[in-house]
Image (tube, helix red, strand yellow):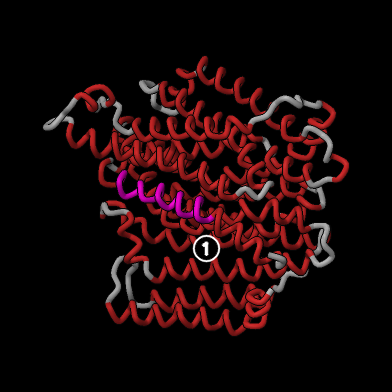
Amino acid sequence: MNNPLKKLAGQTAIYGFSSIVGRFLNFLLTPLFAVYFAKDQFGIITEMYAYVAFLVVFLTYGMETAYFRFITLEEQKDKPVYSTVLISLLSTTFIFIATAVVFAQPVADWLQYPNHTEYVIWFAIIVGLDAVSSIPLAQLRADNKALRFALVNFVNIGVNISLNLFFIVYCSANYETNSNWLIDIFYNPEIGVGYVFISNLIASICKFLLLAPGMKLSEGIQFSLWKKMFRYSSPMLIVGLAGIVNETIDRILIKKIVYAQQLEALGSQAANTFAQEQNGIYGANYKLAMIISMFIQAYRYAAEPFFFKEEQKKDSKETYVKIMNYFIIVVAFMFLVITLYISIFKYFIPNPDFWEGLHIVPILLAAYVCLGIYYNQSIWYKLSQKTGYGAIISLAGAVLTITINLLFIPIYGYTAAAWATLSCYSFMMIISYFIGKRHYPIPYNIKKFFIYAGTALAIYIFSIKGRSLEMLSLSGYIINTILLSLFIALAYFIEKSEFKTLRNG
């Protein structure tokens, strides 16, 4: 496979098979949770996993990207890069888990789950294992062992889904009327939503055990190398933390702000329930937008090591431009598929109580399109080793996100959180483009961006004229299918010569 674009597409397809298909299977847990848990219980799941995303980034502190950077540097090829990174993460993870166990009660009190200190301990272990596992998974990506990577992910996801089905469907359905020794041993109805977390914990342990044989520590840690890597990665930690703030702070703030608003009128317990319900509606509908996020994640698994390896080639920037064009076509197409047929996609959330939040889905989808473009652009500061700029851009985005949420959630509720996400990611995309032009110029085709993004937006606006998001007639489906076909035809017409080159390359 000589064509680098074909190589990237092939790797993305394999990672996509494990990531998109795997995360899609996990995504199917959303309707399960929506059926078996009330809105306030779904809100607990939404909130706790917001903290997980934040903590995993904190515990990896940019070392994953540093690993990719340093294994491609000629002067570092004989250094123990892998063992240095792995020992570093093992050490910090052990300290984190021990601290979480000691302070479990104060943390549970702060989360407003004073009777569930076990949540704190379970999640500390989950994020700790996931943080350490990220490095052997990164090694598999760097070594192009995508099939092994896919196998590990499928086992992890399979265990998680199977245990959720066992606890939430089988045990809960048979506990009262048809109990048996298996249910008596493993099921306690008082744990309730906690079984979602237990399933995740066991799945993370399985993933860690599968990767453990590849965690070679014999070369030890080289502190001079570690210092260089940490200097490179520390701005990436800020990038990651700010990115997680942008992605998850809304679900934390929705609960806090709505709770404070309703406290005086409803009282503590009712206000907390109402806040969790609003968070549950937001979180459930957010899952629909995560379909694009799943593709972006699979793409990033393949693209990050690919970009570093392509850097030394003389036509690398032309390759980056072509990749960006194809990427925009794909995410714009995905945006249209979901928005034009949202009256079908809504059934992934089978409980109609959640459908009042469907209006935020197109906003969040547009936000993820912008985020995906930003991820493509961000390679400039990673390749030029000016990761500080990435930290500045991400921090600016985080400030914008927090500001909009604090100002407008009290007025517009979770809808404001969706607009804050779009505002943040579009801002980061634009500012990164202009700063990157100065420090690592890549001649992106801005005209094509406006054609594809503008056409997709125009089609969406035309499609919603005179109809609600929840319902669509047969004639509406026909019209939307014609509109989607027009977008595909436009992309093919513009990129026809490139597609031929790619096919023959």
Residue 408 position, x and y percent, is 49, 51
Give me the residue at 45% from left, 54% from top: 21
Residue 236 position, x and y percent, is 71, 42
Report the front residue among 190 and 21.
Answer: 21
- Left or right, 225 with reference to 185: right
Can residue 200 be seen here? The reply is yes
Instruction: Judge whether residue 22 is colored magenta.
Output: yes
Q: In this view, does 483 lie above or below 274?
A: below
Dot 1 crowding, Cα within 10 Å, few <14, some 14–19, many 20+: many
Q: In this view, does 453 lie above or below 115?
A: below
Residue type beneath disc 1: Ala
Q: Tell me which corner region of the image, top left, top right, bottom left or bottom right, holds residue 67.
A: top right
Q: Tell me which corner region of the image, top left, top right, bottom left or bottom right, holds residue 78.
A: top right
Can residue 282 be seen here? The reply is no
Mark 1 highlights which residue? 366
Residue 310 position, x and y percent, is 77, 58
- Left or right, 192 with reference to 213: left
The stretch in magenta equals 16-33
Q: Is mark 1 on a helix, strand or loop?
A: helix
Give me the residue at 81% from left, 63% from top: 441
Report the front residue among 80 and 274.
Answer: 80
- Left or right, 218 with reference to 362: right
Of the 4 image quadrants, the one containing the N terminus is bottom right
Give me the residue at 60% from left, 68% from top: 328
Report the front residue among 276 and 309.
Answer: 309
Give me the residue at 40% from left, 32% from top: 197
Instruction: Judge whether residue 450 is colored magenta.
Output: no
Report the front residue among 439 and 216.
Answer: 216
